[in-house]
Each structure stands twice: as C-alpha cells, then as structure tokens.
Image (cartoon, rainbow, N blue to C red):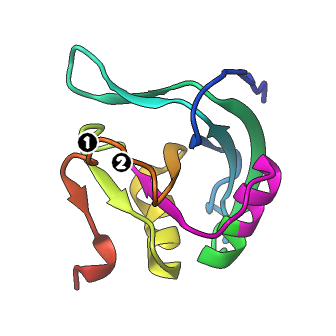
Amino acid sequence: MDVAVEEFKGENKSRIHTAGIEGMENGEKKTLIDFCYWGGKRKVNTNDTFFYNGGMCVAVLLEEGSQVNELRENVCGALNINLEGKLYFYNTKRDKMKYVTLNDNNGVAMLFYLNGNDDDLFVEDTWQNNDSIPDLLQFNKIR
C-alpha cells in the first residue's frame, strides 16, 4: 500500500486521515493508518463537506480495540504535542458534513465501525478560538 504524506504550515490544529489496511474477515483486528495533521484551518467545500487546510503530517497505526488514552498518546506523541486540553472529532463516511466527538473508548470503537477503511480525525486545542463545529454529534450519549 502506498502512503502519500503531505506537509503544510498552519495553526495548532490537526487532521488524521485514516486508511484501513487489514480486515476482520478471519477474526483479525482491523488496523488503520492514521494520517495525523497538525496546523491549519477547517474549510467548507462548495458541496458543503469539510476539509482541513494546513499543518504537518505524520502517520500512526491504530488497532481496533485500542483505548482512547492509547489513541491520544500515539497521536500527540507522533505530532510531538502536549496531549492535555485537546478536542478530538471526526466525520463519517455517511455524512462528511457532520462531526462526531471522540471522548471515550466507545468513541474509538465507533471510529472503526462507522468509517470502514478511511476517516479524518481532527485534533484541536480546546482553548483555541475556532468557528464552532457544525452539527456536532456525541455518539457516547446515544444508547
């Protein structure tokens, strides 16, 4: 599998693009490559979907069943940023115009379940003065 890595300059925000590299067909855990972007700004395409512009890129592997603290440590460690005070959210394959917050282990499981082979996971400092995240969903509150 070829992996393209982009380099950008920007603000203290990141995007993680996730591509599936292994399946669950034989009872194996799915492994995702997380492309982690730090710096940049949320932008809206003409079709109202969102993209992230800016930052540097690193790749992190995430295995299905990972805990939220493991994800945070891997992502922030690879980006060489402090993991305190971060907001994590992602969009789904079904709807690139809405975001789901990632707050707990259930949120990490939903990341794999909702997105199959690829996903964008955004990380921002909670103290930043950003535009609000549109249609923010919190799956950990849905029963």
Q: Position of residue 13 (x, y in %)?
A: 55, 42
Please give the name of the residue rendered at 50% of the width and 47% of the height, measured from the top-left corner.
Answer: 122
Residue 28 visible to the viewer: no
Residue 44 marker: none
Q: Can you say whether 117 is above or below 67 in the image?
A: above
Q: Position of residue 46 (x, y in %)?
A: 22, 14
Labels in figure, total: 2
Please give the name of the residue rendered at 68% of the width and 66% of the height, measured from the top-left corner.
Answer: 83
SS at mark 1? loop
Q: Position of residue 64 (x, y in %)?
A: 64, 68
4 vs 89, nearest the viewer: 89
- Tell me if label 2 and label 1 are in contact, CB under 8 Å: yes
Q: Within the image, what quadrant is residue 93 found in?
A: top left
Please give the name of the residue rendered at 33% of the width and 30% of the height, measured from the top-left corner.
Answer: 50
The disc labelled 1 sits on which kind of residue?
Asp
Please give the name of the residue rendered at 72% of the width and 62% of the height, measured from the top-left corner.
Answer: 82
Dot 2 corresponds to which residue? 92
Q: Which residues are magenta?
A: 73-91
Q: Position of residue 142 (x, y in %)?
A: 22, 79
Relative to residue 44, is residue 4 drawn left or right?
A: right
> Is residue 86 highlighted in magenta?
yes
> Is residue 11 highlighted in magenta?
no
Residue 95 marker: 1
Relative to residue 56, is residue 112 drawn left or right?
A: left
Classed neighbour count for the residue bearing mark 2: other residues with Cα under 10 Å, few (<14), some (14–19), many (≥20): many
The disc labelled 2 sits on which kind of residue?
Thr
| Cα gap from disc 2 to disc 1, whole angstroms | 5 Å
Classed neighbour count for the residue bearing mark 1: other residues with Cα under 10 Å, few (<14), some (14–19), many (≥20): few
